[in-house]
Amino acid sequence: MNTNRLSDTLAKALNDQMTNEAHNAQIYLSYASWASDKGYDGIANFLFRHSNEERNHMMKFLEYILKRGGKVVVTAIPEPGPDPASINDLFEKVFSSEVENTTRIYNIVDLSHQEKDWATFNFMQWFVKEQTEEETMALDLLGKIKKAGGAEANDDALYNLDKDLAGTPDDAVLAQDTSVENP
């Protein structure tokens, strides 16, 4: 008896996204290692935590595919790419990576809607919200580096930014979660 409840197209898209989440974990890991090597331990810690979060996203896709009776296909993870040229470049790359990931998530949502696979559509809503948080986090990082001087940030500003990110929570506050009482 066939217990697979995923179309071939959706199974491939979900497996591809699982690999992409693993790739994103590697990107954050690479950037964290680079920041640590440059002496930015607060930024590195923040990025190491995000690497782990991306790995958890990968596992969510893996578990979902299995629970829907699909076949998990583990493939090679692309290299994370070149090291950032600066902290400013790092945050710009983080933002670009998150925007690209959002596009991929939206494509799976669209595909699940087209196929009327409401279970997958529902599963993907968690990732839609998560990507809103991830993009907000990346925009917050860009805002912080901009206030520190952007590409021209001096050592004092980068030191303070590093210290600030050491204690920054992993999740961004979303507009939909705020109110007049809780801005």
Image (cartoon, rainbow, N blue to C red):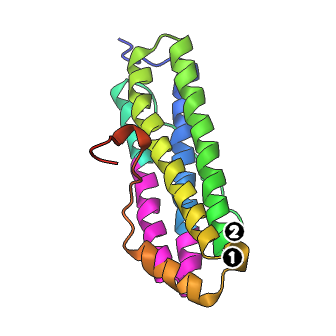
Q: Is residue 124 above or below residue 142?
A: above
Would residue 37 appear left or right of 126 to someone viewing this image?
right
Quadrant of residue 30 within the rendered picture: bottom right
Would residue 178 appear left or right of 161 to someone viewing this image?
left
User: Would residue 80 be seen by someone viewing this image from the given angle?
Assistant: no
How far across and down, in percent of the image, does residue 162 sit?
49, 79
For the point 38% across and 19% down, which residue is it?
A: 119
For the point 60% across and 28% down, which residue is it?
A: 107
How far across and down, in percent of the image, does residue 169 sit?
36, 63
Q: CA distance from mark 1 to mark 2?
A: 5 Å
Residue corresponding to mark 2: 89
> How many neighbours does mark 1 have within 10 angstroms: few (below 14), some (14-19), or many (20 or more)?
some
**Mark 1 residue type:** Ser
Residue corresponding to mark 1: 86
Which of 133 and 70 lies nearest the eye of the viewer? 133
How far across and down, in percent of the image, does residue 97 sit?
63, 52
Q: Secondary structure at mark 1?
A: loop
Which of 119 and 164 lies nearest the eye of the viewer? 164
